[in-house]
Image (spheres, rainbow, N blue to C red):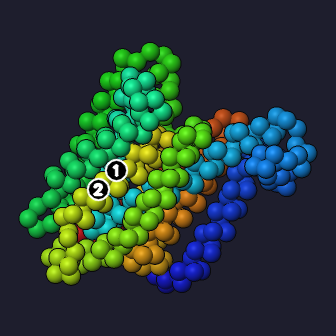
Amino acid sequence: MTRWPVAQHAFVLGALLLLGLLTSLVQGAINLPAGNSLLAVLDALVGSRYSTLLDYQQVVVVDLRLPRVLLAVVVGALLAQCGAVMQGLFRNPLADPGIVGVSSGAAVGAILAIAWLVPLLGDWTIPVCAFAGGLVVTLLVYRLAKTHNGTSVMMLLLAGIAVSAFAGAVIGFVSYISNDQVLRDLSLWQMGSLAGGDRFNLAIAYATLLILLVAFQRRAAALNALLLGEPEARHLGIRVERLKIELVVLTAIGVGVAVSCSGIIGFVGLVVPHLVRLTVGPCHHTLLPLSALMGAVLLLYADLMGRLLLQPAELPVGLVTALIGAPFFLVLLLQMRRRGA
């Protein structure tokens, strides 16, 4: 496959992101003029009154759609970047926070917080519990998949399936014993939704994304060395075990925050890094930021599709990404089978 220059790739993704942002602001159950919608956003930022939209239309743009698209961008970037790091860490393109059970573990932590623990730490309860759940599952799966020859792909997938099944059972049990209101909240949350974007969630998510962009980029060279194999990486001076722990913790933070803000959204971390790797190569210096950018674009358009396909109803964004990602995952498995992996 012909590889694109990095600058060209970034320019195309940036243009798609801007187009998606504008389209998401003006399209939906109510279609609004693009110019006045942008002016409404400007009015909200600087306190002016340039937009001629009616009051309820400004509420739709500023209070409903703007937080939603901002959350789609940051959650997509977090999931895609964490997926790229996990694939580099496990040296396998099938590694994904959803497939190996990390998202399920974070979901268990978040659901326990939603059902019972919200007053414990206030607004921080859900992100902290999601991070704890994701971290425990990541460490568990990694330990199960690790052999003296490296990381076993089969054990990785089987452990992920087992952990996801157990997490599903825990989530089902919590849902079963919850009251009607909590049950409704949990059901919508499990299918993935970007409707819960508020200032607190956005502040945590963007701060986490900024920290992870820097932290992952500082470890990009070590990830490149790890692709050669653990013994080779050690010969190059990489402290492999320390690197693994750092990446596991950072990935669990990213996935935990994303899951706590939007629920379970699968396949973004699987599809995006693979596509970026095909178009610009495996170097993590470019793979990580471009994966973040493409993840933002993918989730933004997936959410837009979910809002437009069944108007005025709304299709959960997790279902849209599953419809896109599941066939892609099967194609990936077939390719690996043909290669004898």
User: Does residue 176 appear to the left or right of 29 in the view shown?
Assistant: left
**What is the total number of numbered labels drawn onto the structure image?**
2
Horizontal and vertical percent position of residue 176: 37, 20
Q: Which residue is mark 1?
A: 252
User: Does residue 263 appear to the left or right of 70 in the view shown?
Assistant: left
Quadrant of residue 52 in the image?
Answer: top right
- The answer to whether residue 314 is above or below residue 223 is above
Q: Secondary structure at mark 2?
A: helix
User: Marks 1 and 2, Cα distance to the nearest angstrom?
Assistant: 6 Å
Residue nearest the viewer, comparing 64 with 124: 124
Residue nearest the viewer, comparing 218 with 81: 218
Horizontal and vertical percent position of residue 119: 43, 24
Residue nearest the viewer, comparing 62 with 323: 62
Query: What amino acid type should be assigned to the residue bearing mark 1?
Result: Ala
Q: Secondary structure at mark 1?
A: helix
Find the residue positioned furthest to the left. Answer: 148
Contact? badges 1 and 2 (CB < 8 Å): yes
Residue in the picture at 46% in, 47% down: 258
Q: Which residue is mark 2?
A: 248
Quadrant of residue 311 in the image?
Answer: top right
Residue nearest the viewer, comparing 189 with 43: 43
Visible residue check, residue 288: yes
Horizontal and vertical percent position of residue 90: 26, 64
- The answer to whether residue 338 is above or below residue 61 is below
| Quarter in which the C terminus is drawn | bottom left
Horizontal and vertical percent position of residue 220: 36, 73
Query: What amino acid type should be assigned to the residue bearing mark 2?
Result: Val
Residue in the picture at 27% in, 50% down: 138
